[in-house]
Image (spheres, rainbow, N blue to C red):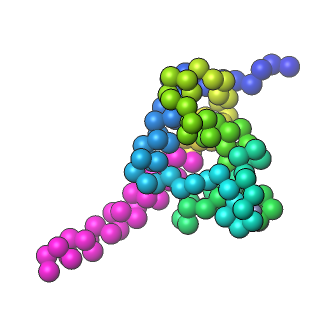
Amino acid sequence: MKAAAEASPTAALIRYFEIWALRLNGFFPDFTRCSSCGKGVINEGFFAWVESGEARCADCAGDIGIHVSAKSASALEKMMKLPPEKFMILPFEHDAASELEKFAQRLLGFNLERQLKSWPLLREALQN
Ligand SMILES: [Zn+2]
């Protein structure tokens, strides 16, 4: 059997900085535990509810939310704990990399939209 395709170290670094940029801006909630039953979800993956910033385990999610596989959840955990130069030399499967890219885009899209919507209100408030 052929080994799973690995993402390049450059792709790993880009994913790393995307997630950290979200985190440092307060756009990356704690996705390590199920918000409903409290179970840790890193080992089995989770369903992310982007709008409420919650993670749910497969039992509690009822298939709602963005599925983040066990591989991706484990990569996320490593991103949180390791400096970039250590993360980029770890095995990082292409599937997990592309799943995390979509996840980061959803988080960014949701948070930017929310900020843009609040902009007219903010401007109005400043003019009064
Ligand atoms: Zn649960």
The N terminus - image quarter: top right
Give x and y (percent) for residue 66: 65, 55
Identify the image quadrant of residue 117. Answer: bottom left
Give x and y (percent) for residue 68: 67, 48
Give x and y (percent) for residue 105: 50, 48
What residue appears at the point 33 percent right and 69 percent down from the top-left corner?
Answer: 118
Identify the image quadrant of residue 124. Answer: bottom left
Q: Residue furthest left?
A: 127
User: Ligand 1 appears in which quadrant?
Assistant: bottom right
- Does residue 66 appear left or right of residue 3 in this picture? left
Q: Is residue 112 above or below residue 20?
A: below
Q: Does the magenta stretch mainly form a helix, a strand or a loop?
A: helix
In terms of depth relative to the viewer, which is nearer, 111 or 27? Answer: 27
What residue appears at the point 50 percent right and 42 percent down from the top-left corner?
Answer: 19
Q: Is residue 122 above or below residue 22?
A: below
Q: Is residue 120 magenta?
A: yes
In terms of depth relative to the viewer, which is nearer, 39 or 128? Answer: 39
Q: Is residue 40 magenta?
A: no
Residue 61 in view? no
Q: Is residue 120 above or below residue 11?
A: below
What residue appears at the point 61 percent right and 35 percent down from the top-left corner?
Answer: 78
- Does residue 96 appear left or right of residue 21 in this picture? right
Identify the image quadrant of residue 88. Answer: top right
Residue 70 in view? yes
What residue appears at the point 57 percent right and 54 percent down from the top-left corner?
Answer: 30
Q: Is residue 88 above or below residue 16?
A: above
Q: Which residues are magenta?
A: 103-128
Q: Residue furthest right?
A: 1
The C terminus - image quarter: bottom left
Give x and y (percent) for residue 47: 68, 56
